[in-house]
Amino acid sequence: MKFKAIICVSLLSISAGLLAPISEAQAQVVVGVGVAPPPPRYEVIPPPRGGFVWAPGFWRWNGRRHVWVGGHYIRARPGYRYYEPRWERGDRGDWRFRERGWER
């Protein structure tokens, strides 16, 4: 009997986790780097696609150098606004990378 109760509670907690909205699971990752990113590259944006948002390319830090990640379309999320990844200058002169994401 006790075993059945444990199984039921486990299944309920797993199913609740699967049904939780994705927006609640987002976390902001910040990477600090001592080297400024290069200027953005010019990209030709393909024609608009219904239900998608253009995510422009950006420079990502791979642990040793900046690497270009090309722009692409991502599926739109109704009721949310997409914000682009960006590099910001930190208080100590380092560069901080803010991941892309969605906000209401």
Image (cartoon, helix red, strand yellow):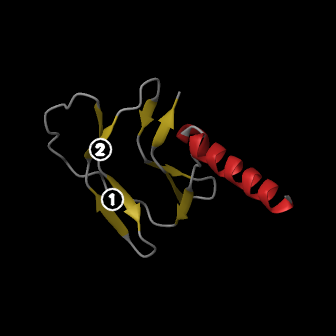
> Residue 55 appears at what percent x and percent y?
31, 42
Is 101 situated above or below 81?
below
Q: Residue drawn 55% across and 62% down? A: 32
Is 50 situated above or below 34?
above
In the figure, is residue 1 to the left or right of 48? right
Is 78 situated above or below 11?
above
Is 50 situated above or below 36?
above
In the figure, is residue 94 to the left or right of 6? left
> Residue 67 appears at what percent x and percent y?
33, 65
Q: Hey, what amino acid is under mark 2?
A: Pro
> Residue 9 appears at what percent x and percent y?
76, 51
How many labels, in total? Answer: 2
Q: Residue drawn 28% across and 29% down? A: 51
Q: Residue furthest front?
A: 1
Element class at badge 2 = loop
What mark, if any, has residue 56 been given in the picture? 2
Q: Is residue 94 visible?
A: no
Q: Nearer the viewer, residue 65 or 69?
A: 69
In the figure, is residue 54 to the left or right of 78? left
Q: Nearer the viewer, residue 40 or 9?
A: 9
Q: Residue drawn 20% across and 32% down? A: 49
Q: Nearer the viewer, residue 59 or 101?
A: 101
> If the image is split into quadrants, where does the N terminus sit?
bottom right
Task: Determine which quarter of the picture holds residue 76.
Answer: top left
Badge 2: residue crowd in 10 Å (few <14, some 14–19, many ≥20): some
Q: Which residue is mark 1?
A: 38
Q: Between label 2 and label 1, give the one nearer the viewer.
A: 2
Element class at badge 1 = loop
Q: Residue drawn 42% across and 34% down? A: 82
Q: Residue furthest bottom?
A: 64
